Amino acid sequence: RQTRSSPRRRRAMASPPTPGLPLPPNAIKAFLAPPLVPAMAPAPPARPPPPAAGSSDSATLIPLAAIKRLIAGETGENKMGADALHLIHKASELFVEKLAAASVKKSDGETIGYDAVAAAVDDEDQGEFAFLSDLVPPTTTFEAYLAQQQQLQQEQQQEAMNEEA
């Protein structure tokens, strides 16, 4: 199907004007017009704040799918009842909340850094997170590490000499 174009449109589609000739009036307007921008989608609604500790709100801090994936990753199968899965999910959330609260007490600013988490794990008074001491050791400098290794070697050498005597 052929469509007819108006004479005005044919003029606009014609080759560009040669230098020295006046431009058609609509050419300047089209040149100066802002480019067409598609309408932007509205911003998604803000996420609600996480529920307070101990509240019975249905919103969760850890997605249930993440807990399922962790359990299935260990065995390759997910043969767990819904009630056991819910209990593990809730226990995981409580654990993360307690570790975060202990870390906030040990932090020195607005953010929780590795040092704050390591201090919360290493806290002698609480002892709640002592089982994590191998996973979250306190930070140390390389020089301190070398001194510690030399001290261990000297102790081992003295023990070997005591056994020989």
Image (spheres, rainbow, N blue to C red):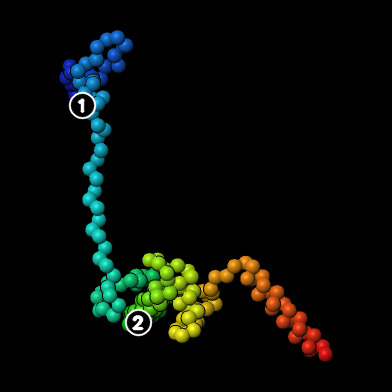
Query: In the figure, residue 59 lies in which quadrant?
Result: bottom left
Q: Which mark is residue 141?
A: none
Circle 1 crowding by C-alpha within 10 Å: few under 14, some 14–19, many from 20 = few
Is residue 69 something that shows in the picture?
no
Neighbor class of circle 2 (other Cα within 10 Å; few <14, some 14-19, many 20+) is few
Quadrant into which the N terminus falls? top left
Vertical arrangement, residue 55 with respect to residue 45, above or below: below
Q: Amino acid at mark 2?
A: Leu
Residue 57 at what x, y percent from top left? 24, 75
Left or right: where 4 falls relative to 16? left
Tell me the distance, in whole angstroms, between the alpha carbons under discs 1 and 2. 68 Å
At 25% from the left and 65% from the top, the residue drawn is: 48
Instruction: Estimate the x, y position of residue 119 in percent, counting from the top left.
Output: 48, 75
Q: Work out whether 139 lies above or below 54.
A: above
**Regarding mark 2 in the picture, which secondary structure is present there?**
helix
Q: Secondary structure at mark 1?
A: loop
Q: Nearer the viewer, mark 1 or mark 2?
A: 2
Q: Residue at x 18, y 21 (%)?
A: 4
Residue 83 visible to the viewer = yes
Q: Residue at x 23, y 28 (%)?
A: 33
75 and 138: which one is in front? 138
Residue for badge 2 = 87
Q: Which mark is residue 1?
A: 1
Residue 28 x/y as whole percent: 23, 21
